[in-house]
Image (cartoon, rainbow, N blue to C red):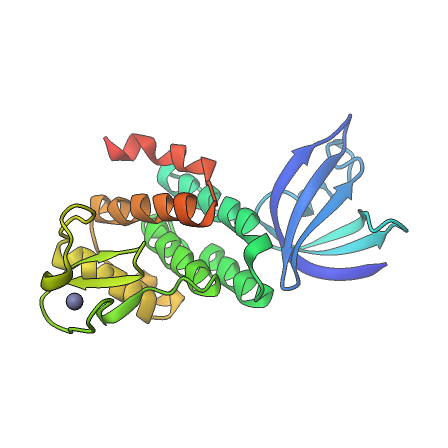
Amino acid sequence: MKEIEGIIIHQLAQKEKDAMLSFLTNEGLLSIYARGIKDNKSKNAHAVSVGCLSSLEINEGRLGGKSLKSATLITYLGENLKSLLDYACFNYALELARKADEAIEDKESAYKALHTFLAMRKEDDSIAHLLAYIAQILIILGERIKIDGCVYCDNKSEIVSYSLDDGGLVCQNHFDKGRMEKESKDQINLLRFLFMAKQEEASRLNLSLIQYLHLLNQYHIFLKDNLGIDIKSFTLFKPFFQ
Ligand SMILES: [Zn+2]
């Protein structure tokens, strides 16, 4: 038996009153079978709902299967999910944490990044923190975006766009209008900030929802097409794109 701290990021109902928990820890993602937690009388239920930072006592079977013995709530990180936008951000982040885990080697940094997102997000800046979280995950996956000059020639001036596919900013000379769109100063600076500042500093960002969504959409396509990480929760953002 071992006891380990982490965040519940997913719950999948199983037969009768059981569930399979996805539990993110600084050792990576664990799947834990939790018996009876859908029962009203379960003493562990309150500590294993999605968004709980909890300490779990886990039994390991001879074949490596893990099951929950007991759960102690440390703090609930899904507090104040009042708006649909905040709810969408919360779900997107948890799904990304779950789906990126396999490709991530530095489990400790990935865990810390999710914890920072959940602890820092507030109703009005949840999306800024989501973008900062995704930037951290990309860095951890070795997909850091070059933001100190053009990705082709290192030119520091005349930056007119960026390309996530190419991995950096793009200057006027290397702008390829067949594949790229010109980006506003705000969008370029947003990307710079996210790959330069500390994740928690996203609280300082002050852009419009449309500007945040523009980058979220680009990130989303990049994750799906280049890294094979398809985040279904993206559909929760649909109403905001209209
Ligand atoms: Zn260039």
> Which residue occupies 77% across, 27% down?
15
User: Visible in this render: residue 80?
Assistant: no
Left or right relative to 103: residue 192: left
Which residue reaches farthest top?
16
The picture places residue 200, in percent across and down from the top left corner, at: 39, 66
Residue 171: quadrant of the picture: bottom left
Q: How many marks?
A: 0
Q: In screen coordinates, is 130 left or right of 112? A: left
The residue under the point 85% across, 53% down is 60
Left or right of 76, for residue 239: left
Q: Is residue 18 visible?
A: yes
| Residue occupying image coordinates x 76% and y 31% | 39
Q: Quadrant of the C terminus?
A: top left
Q: Residue at x 59, y 43 (%)?
A: 50
In percent of width and height, residue 197 lies at: 33, 70
Q: Position of residue 138 (x, y in %)?
A: 42, 59
Comparing 183 with 122, the one in front is 183
Above-or-below relation of 68 to 25: above
The picture quadrant where one finds residue 169 is bottom left
Q: Quadrant of the N terminus?
A: bottom right
Q: Quadrant of ligand 1?
A: bottom left
In percent of width and height, residue 24 lies at: 62, 54
Q: Nearer the viewer, residue 200 or 196?
A: 196
